[in-house]
Amino acid sequence: MATEKWVLMVTAQTPTNIAVIKYWGKRDEVRILPVNDSISVTLDPDHLCTVTTVAVSPAFDRDRMWLNGKEISLSGSRYQNCLREIRSRAGDVEDKEKGIKIGKEDWKKLHLHIASHNNFPTAAGLASSAAGFACLVFSLAKLMNVDEDPSHLSAIARQGSGSACRSLFGGFVKWTMGSKEDGSDSVAVQLADEKHWDDLVIIIAVVSSRQKETSSTSGMRESVETSLLLQHRAKEVVPKRILQMEEAIKNRDFASFTQLTCTDSNQFHAVCLDTSPPIFYMNDTSHRIISLVEKWNRSEGTPQVAYTFDAGPNAVLIARNRKVAVQLLQGLLYYFPPKSDTDMKSYVVGDNSILKEAG
Ligand code: DP6
């Protein structure tokens, strides 16, 4: 390693993902191993994403991280697990132009500075941790020349936040729960790339950008401890639903896709209600959006829009094509005008896309 002062950095941009078959509940809290498989759609990275720059320099005296401009602590086990796993796989790095040579062993002594920015509300039920940890792991892997395929990287991102493992791929992604105790087979795999079903348009109606009261992590812990419905869902319902969803995606069968997506979202929120004390993520506006979509789908005779809600009141609406998306946006703006007390904004997210390395 050269002794003069230098900084080496990598910037990556990673999209968030929205589950259409939800992950809710862990069988191992430390390794972040889920009680069921899940399936998600990755969003266009230019709209809802995290941008992370990771830098290494002999001038840095400790690892530090800034999230949206504010320094945060890296002492938590989730960050520490990701950093340890990536460091243990680091390779040799050489930048001839700058005269920098970093050997595998040097990474253990060098410190990192990490700056991450979300272009959407953090912790408001829009899967900010998914994009965040996926981007962190991806950018560190690039910086440290980690020679692993995205599935292996997904198993590292999973240890930061479960849903993050699915953001290592674009398009439609399945997180297989795995059965090994060490979690090495609990990884994400791509079911279909972003071009497979590019008619779909995803609209996110931001009902509230306030931070949620119950985090996903503590909410799902309470559900595992108290909800019988969760046990039934994980063992009896999701395994069949996963197979059906894989078929629906493969065949671009929007009617089945909608039925499965909406039913799964509703069952996830039913599990939240079945938790003691009950967890309320959706609000009146969320319920009104569900009614609007259900009525519209029924009146058309065939489904036009699927809805799904994560751990917050914001609606994720998947329109079957652009024409339907325009009608949906008009309907949303008519019934929920942005300046009303519902504080709703809505915007088109666009096509699915893949993870990008910005530099
Ligand atoms: C409702 O991945 O945020 O969005 O693993 O504890 O970090 P941790 O939880 P997180 O949970 C996401 C839950 C969900 C459903 C999903 O994305 O599958």
Image: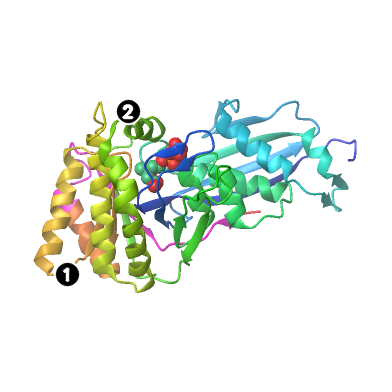
Question: Label 2 is placed on what type of residue?
Answer: Glu
Q: Which mark is residue 212?
A: none
Above or below for 68 versus 11 = above
Q: Of 81 and 240, which appears nearest the observer? A: 240
Please state the horizontal and vertical placement of residue 303, each as a whole percent of the image.
19, 66
Left or right: 143 as drawn, with respect to 43: right
Quadrant of the rendered image containing residue 214: top left
Residue occupying the point 90% across, 40% down: 2
**In which quadrant is the N terminus drawn?**
top right
Left or right: 341 as drawn, with respect to 271: left
Task: Look at the image and tell me whether residue 68 can be seen.
Answer: yes
Q: Which mark is residue 302?
A: 1
User: In what element is the residue under mark 1?
Assistant: loop
User: In what element is the residue under mark 2?
Assistant: loop
Earlier along the polypeptide chain: callout 1 or callout 2?
A: 2
Q: Is mark 2 within 8 Å of ligand 1?
A: no
Residue occupying the point 35% across, 74% down: 251
Coloured how?
Answer: rainbow
Task: Look at the image and tell me whether residue 281 can be seen.
Answer: no
Above or below for 352 versus 83 = below
Ligand 1, what quadrant?
top left
Q: Which mark is residue 213?
A: 2
Please state the horizontal and vertical placement of residue 272, each as a whole percent of the image.
26, 36
Above or below for 124 versus 334 = above
Q: Of 205 and 144, which appears nearest the observer? A: 144
Q: Of 179 and 332, which appears nearest the observer? A: 179
Magenta segment boundaries in residue numbering: 333-356
Left or right: 44 as drawn, with respect to 86: left
